[in-house]
Image (cartoon, grey):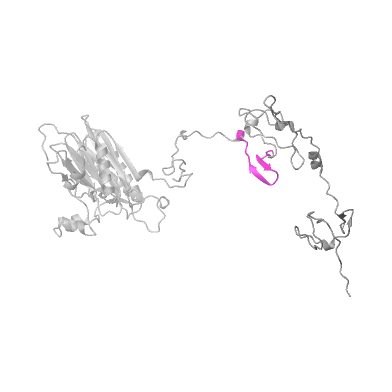
């Protein structure tokens, strides 16, 4: 016969002290196993396993337990209000046993310390003094936060003052056209955003008292291969002579932009040398074209190192058109397909084209093989038969002189403009009515007309107003 253990009756659970019923093997409140309890001694169960010793209190906890808290005040009455206890009445400690961190306030003393707060105008405290517990800056100006990570904390006193907005950059520097902040380096790129800057010749404008010119790269070309020169010279009798020269670089040639620039400058210098000596303006124009041709030819004779690095190079080349206006004479000279137009102020009278192209289309019309509309519709129409350059067939400068009997303007331009206003009457329709009084505005309008039409080529226009001739002058 087996013997079964009978638990000793207990009046309450030794775990949660809930009342027990006779015969309970488990506490109904907490589920405590009552069968493992030894007999009751002195009215309370004696545990079979001795209880672990009570944990010792840490030193900070002992100090915290030793703090004497103020007695609670008596209920306040109308005659005697309850006293107020401030946080500074007790000495506070943190959980680790150290003193509580102080807090620097913008005004007044630090709470609980009696130390004056840092002022904004304090040369030391206001210059980035470290806050307790945040770590002091090291030699490199980096503050350690508890040793876990580093925070960049440069001393503001070591930072150079920022350049005020709108300050003038050093003389000779260029500002980026894209970001408007960076400076342009010697290679033509912005040091701030890296944007390539427009070349100086991409858009040029110049105005004198009696002549103006505008040149633009256009919308399709990567550079401007046109060039112009405008000026005025004094004739032997003291009267002025106004000069305009426009050159168009031949894109299929080497260095077309250098060719147009050299030709325009050489022609302008030749006219300024010949006109004051009393040379007839038409003869002076002829000599200017010869000088321009020599300047372009000289480019082909430069050392190989001065040319573009290409295995096969042809000679630089360009076209030429120029005009000289005196008190009663209008002279034009040209080679190639750049043109000059006469547009009178009185639009009731017809305009006229003053030049004839050296081109395939012009040759077809002159030979009677095609009419003008058919010739210029052909894809070979703009193939030039005359130009300035070492590989030109022969130099045949064209010059002509006119004596207008009324006021008007001379429009000297490259094919980048007249492709969009080919006929004389078409050109007259796009020339503003006040062109004689505002030549620069007129040139700007004409360049805008070409860009609005597509801007397939470089566009260069010079506008020379012709004054009202003296009484009795006729036309030639």
Residue 138 highlighted magenta (yes or no) = yes
Considering every residue shown, the one lying at the far top of the view is 79
Would residue 55 be found to the left or right of residue 102 on screen? right
Residue 363 drawn at (x, y percent): 18, 56
Considering every residue shown, the one lying at the far bottom of the view is 1
Residue 218 drawn at (x, y percent): 31, 49
| First to last magenta residue range | 136-157
Identify the image quadrant of residue 160: top right
Identify the image quadrant of residue 102: top right
Q: How many labels were placed on the picture? A: 0
Residue 208 higher or lower than 372, as above or below: above
Residue 191 higher or lower than 34, as above or below: above
Identity of the residue drawn at 26% across and 43% down: 461
Identity of the residue drawn at 22% across and 54% down: 359
Viewer-closest of 426 and 104? 104
Task: Give the quadrant of the N terminus.
Answer: bottom right
Would residue 81 be found to the left or right of residue 272 on screen? right
Viewer-closest of 32 and 262? 32
Would residue 426 be found to the left or right of residue 392 on screen? left
Residue 93 highlighted magenta (yes or no) = no
Considering every residue shown, the one lying at the far front of the view is 22
* Whether residue 290 is visible: no
Residue 67 drawn at (x, y percent): 79, 36
Identity of the residue drawn at 76% across and 58% down: 30
Viewer-closest of 451 and 37? 37
* Whether residue 181 is visible: yes
Viewer-closest of 53 and 75? 75
Identify the image quadrant of residue 125: top right
């Amino acid at each position: 016969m087996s013997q079964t253990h009978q638990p000793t009756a207990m009046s309450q659970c030794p775990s949660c002290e809930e009342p027990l019923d006779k015969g309970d093997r488990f506490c109904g409140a907490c589920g405590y196993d009552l069968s493992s309890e030894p007999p009751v001694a002195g009215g309370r169960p004696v545990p079979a396993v001795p209880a672990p010793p009570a944990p010792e209190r840490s030193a900070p906890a002992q100090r915290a337990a030793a703090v004497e808290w103020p007695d609670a005040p008596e209920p306040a009455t109308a005659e005697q209000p309850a006293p107020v206890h401030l946080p500074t009445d007790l000495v506070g400690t943190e959980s680790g046993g150290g003193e509580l961190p102080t807090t620097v306030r913008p005004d007044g003393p630090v709470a609980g310390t009696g130390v004056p707060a840092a002022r904004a105008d304090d040369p030391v405290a206001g210059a980035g003094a470290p806050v307790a517990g945040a770590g002091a800056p090291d030699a490199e100006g980096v503050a350690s936060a508890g040793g876990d990570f580093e925070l960049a904390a440069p001393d503001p006193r070591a930072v150079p003052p920022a350049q005020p907005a709108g300050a003038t950059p050093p003389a000779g520097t260029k500002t980026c056209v894209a970001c408007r902040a960076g400076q342009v380096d010697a290679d033509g790129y912005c040091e701030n955003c890296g944007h390539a800057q427009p070349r100086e010749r991409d858009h040029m404008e110049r105005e004198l008292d009696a002549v103006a010119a505008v040149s633009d790269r256009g919308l399709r070309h990567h550079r401007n291969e046109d060039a112009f020169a405008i000026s005025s010279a004094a004739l032997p009798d003291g009267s002025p002579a106004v000069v305009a020269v426009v050159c168009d670089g031949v894109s299929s040639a080497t260095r077309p932009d250098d060719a147009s620039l050299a030709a325009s400058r050489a022609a302008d210098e030749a006219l300024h040398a010949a006109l004051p000596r009393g040379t007839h303006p038409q003869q002076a124009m002829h000599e200017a074209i010869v000088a321009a041709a020599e300047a372009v030819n000289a480019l082909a004779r430069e050392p190989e190192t001065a040319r573009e690095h290409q295995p096969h190079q042809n000679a630089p080349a360009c076209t030429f058109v120029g005009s000289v206006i005196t008190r009663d004479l209008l002279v034009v000279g040209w080679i190639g397909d750049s043109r000059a137009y006469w547009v009178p102020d009185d639009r009731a009278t017809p305009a006229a084209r003053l030049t004839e192209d050296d081109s395939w289309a012009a040759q077809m019309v002159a030979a009677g093989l095609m009419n003008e509309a058919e010739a210029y519709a052909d894809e070979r129409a703009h193939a030039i038969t005359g130009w300035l350059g070492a590989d030109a067939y022969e130099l045949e400068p064209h010059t002509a002189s006119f004596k207008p009997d009324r006021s008007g303007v001379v429009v000297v331009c490259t094919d980048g403009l007249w492709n969009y206003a080919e006929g004389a009457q078409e050109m007259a329709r796009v020339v503003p009515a006040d062109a004689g009084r505002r030549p620069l505005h007129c040139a700007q309008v004409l360049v805008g007309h070409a860009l609005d039409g597509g801007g397939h080529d470089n566009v260069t226009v010079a506008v020379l107003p012709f004054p009202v001739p003296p009484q009795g002058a006729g036309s030639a």
